[in-house]
Amino acid sequence: MAKFTEEEHHFKVVQYNEPPPSREASGSVGGEVTKRQSFPFSSGKESHRYRVVPAAQWSRLQSYRCFLLQDTRFKLGDFVRVANRLTSQDNPTEHAVRDLERPERDWVAYILEIRAADPYHVFARVYWMYWPEDIPKRVMQRSTRIRGPEIFHQSHELIASNHMDIIDVMSVNGLETVKPVSNSRRTTRRSQLFWKESFDCFQKTMSGDMGSKQ
C-alpha cells in the first residue's frame, strides 16, 4: 500500500455546479482531471462532476469494495452513521443553517468509494444525507408552500443531497438502513429511516424525484 505523511491524509472533494463548456473540455478543469459520479437518488441519468484533491495522493491509494470496522463489514452502496462533531471544521452540512441549541444526531452518508493507504488510514467518498433541519429554512418554506405542511417527518426522514465529501472511516459509528418512499404514501415502519426528497446544495432546490436505490 502507499505510504503517506499525516499531512497528506487530508482529502477534499471539489465539485462543479456548471456543465463542461464542451465535450473536449469535459475531462479537465484548469489542467486537473475531473470525474463524473452518478446520483443514485434519481430515477434519471443525473450525475455530478468532481475531483479529489490532492489528486496525486488520492490516486495512489488502493481502491477497495469494503472495509471492516469493529467486526462490522461496510461496503460500497451502504448507508452509514457518521459521528457528529460540532467542533469539527469538516461540517458536512456547511450548506445548511443548523440550530446549535438542538440535541444533535449522527450524520448519515452513502458510500460511493473506498480507498486506503494502510489499515489505519482508510477513507470513504460519500454523498451526505441531510436531516430536514439541515436544509436552509427558505428552501423548506418554499417546499412547504408547494407540497403542503406535512411533507416532512422530522424524526425519521432524511433528504438525499448531492453534497459529496471524503471521510475517515474511523468516524463511522455503524451501518444504517434508509428506505426510499414514494411521495404519495409512506409504507415504512414508524421507527424506520426513509427518504423521498433530494436537495441540490448548489441550486438550493428540492426535488421529489423518487430514487432508483431500492
Image (tube, rainbow, N blue to C red):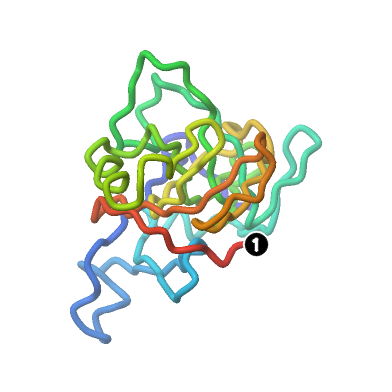
Q: Is residue 10 left or right of residue 74?
A: left
Task: Return the x and y of residue 214 as percentages of the image width and height.
Answer: 65, 62
Q: Looking at the image, is 170 positioned above or below residue 122?
A: above
Q: Looking at the image, is 37 positioned above or below residue 107?
A: below
**Identity of the residue furthest to the right in this view:** 71
Task: Return the x and y of residue 161 as percentages of the image width and height.
Answer: 41, 51
Question: Badge 1 is on which residue?
Answer: 214
Helix, strand or loop at label 1? It is: loop
**Identity of the residue furthest to the top in this view:** 101
Report crowding for label 1: few under 14, some 14 to 19, many 20 or more residues within 10 A (C-alpha). Answer: few
* Quadrant of residue 47 within the rendered picture: bottom left
| Along the viewing direction, whichever of 12 and 105 lies nearer the viewer | 105
Which residue is at a point 33% across and 53% down the rendered structure image? 206
Q: How many labels were placed on the picture?
A: 1
Task: Return the x and y of residue 170 as percentages of the image width and height.
Answer: 61, 33
Which residue is at a point 26% across and 86% down the rendered structure image? 24
Amino acid type, mark 1 = Gln
Q: Looking at the image, is 139 positioned above or below residue 65?
A: above
